[in-house]
Image (cartoon, rainbow, N blue to C red):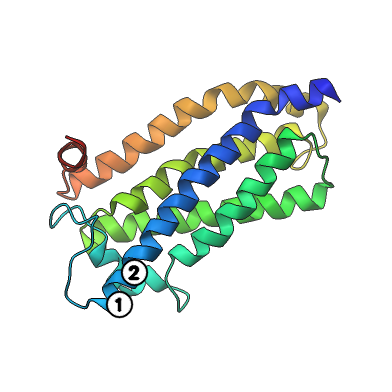
């Protein structure tokens, strides 16, 4: 049991860290949405420039695809990730079907985020700071979860594949960096100076 906990320690810690960051971003976006509803025509605190802001995203139909503000999904979804992270650290063992459902949820979040990235870059032509924070943690969470589901036997019964997957977790950071590079490249090609705008926000 101790080796099991140690082997999955990094994954559990990451789920907790990602959940905290993702939930906080969703919470901030929810506050900004309430602010806009109470103050039509005003600008939010995350408004940096025409290109870097939350206002346009929150006011668009893409910002409420399911009939309510997208951040509400984050407020609930990231709490589930947080609980899973704590459970992994505690050494809790879940049945295969349970991990499968969790994997489907993470995959759904990843697909949704990819769609939102495309909408932000190519349709809205704007980058939302808190949305980017969500993207930044959803992408590696998806990669890490796929690897974890391979090594814990959820996606395969092959012991050989499971052993190889155990070594694949070390490649998740590189895969994440490459994914970030793709997003930055797409933004640059679309005429959005992502690096410049983020630098302006930070400095």
Element marked by disc 2: helix
Query: Which residue is at a point 60% across and 54% down the rendered structure image?
Result: 79
Query: Which residue is at a point 45% across and 33% down the rendered structure image?
Result: 176
Element marked by disc 1: helix
Nearest the eye: 186 or 62: 62
> Which disc number belongs to residue 60?
none
Q: The C terminus is located in which quarter? A: top left
Nearest the eye: 169 or 56: 56
Answer with left or right where residue 95 lies relative to residue 124: right
Answer with left or right where residue 72 lies relative to residue 84: left
Q: Quadrant of residue 188?
A: top left
Q: Is residue 49 above or below residue 165?
A: below
Q: Residues within 10 Å of mark 2 (few under 14, many from 20)?
A: many
Q: The N terminus is located in which quarter? A: top right
Q: Quadrant of residue 149?
A: top right
Query: Which residue is at a point 45% across and 51% down the rendered structure image?
Result: 24
Q: Is residue 98 above or below residue 143?
A: below
Query: Where is residue 8 drawn, in percent x and y?
Result: 70, 28
> Which disc number belongs to residue 33?
2
Query: Where is residue 83 drawn, in percent x and y?
Result: 67, 48
How many angstroms separate mark 2 from mark 1 (CA)? 6 Å
Nearest the eye: 13 or 106: 13
Q: Is residue 33 above or below residue 17?
A: below
Query: Which residue is at a point 43% across and 57% down the rendered structure image?
Result: 26
Q: Is residue 71 above or below residue 93?
A: below
Query: Where is residue 103 drawn, in percent x and y?
Result: 66, 49
Answer with left or right where residue 50 lies relative to residue 141: left
Q: Residues within 10 Å of mark 1 (few under 14, many from 20)?
A: few
- Disc 2 + disc 1, Cβ < 8 Å: yes
Residue corresponding to mark 1:
37
């Amino acid at each position: 049991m101790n080796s099991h906990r140690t082997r999955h320690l990094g994954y559990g810690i990451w789920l907790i860290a990602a959940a905290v960051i993702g939930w906080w971003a969703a919470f901030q976006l929810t506050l900004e949405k309430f602010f806009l509803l109470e103050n039509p025509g005003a600008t939010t605190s995350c408004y940096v420039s025409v290109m870097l802001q939350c206002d346009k995203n929150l006011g668009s139909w893409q910002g409420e695809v399911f009939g309510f503000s997208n951040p509400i999904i984050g407020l609930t979804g990231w709490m589930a990730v947080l609980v899973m992270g704590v459970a992994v650290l505690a050494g809790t063992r879940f049945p295969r079907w349970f991990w499968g459902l969790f994997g489907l949820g993470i995959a759904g979040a990843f697909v949704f985020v990819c769609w939102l990235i495309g909408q932000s870059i190519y349709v809205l032509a704007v980058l939302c700071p808190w949305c980017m924070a969500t993207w930044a943690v959803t992408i590696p969470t998806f990669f890490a979860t796929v690897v974890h589901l391979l090594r814990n036997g959820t996606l395969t019964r092959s012991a050989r594949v499971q052993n190889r997957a155990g070594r694949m977790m070390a490649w998740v950071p590189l895969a994440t960096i490459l994914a970030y590079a793709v997003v930055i490249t797409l933004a640059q090609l679309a005429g959005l100076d992502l690096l410049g705008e983020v630098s302006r926000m930070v400095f």
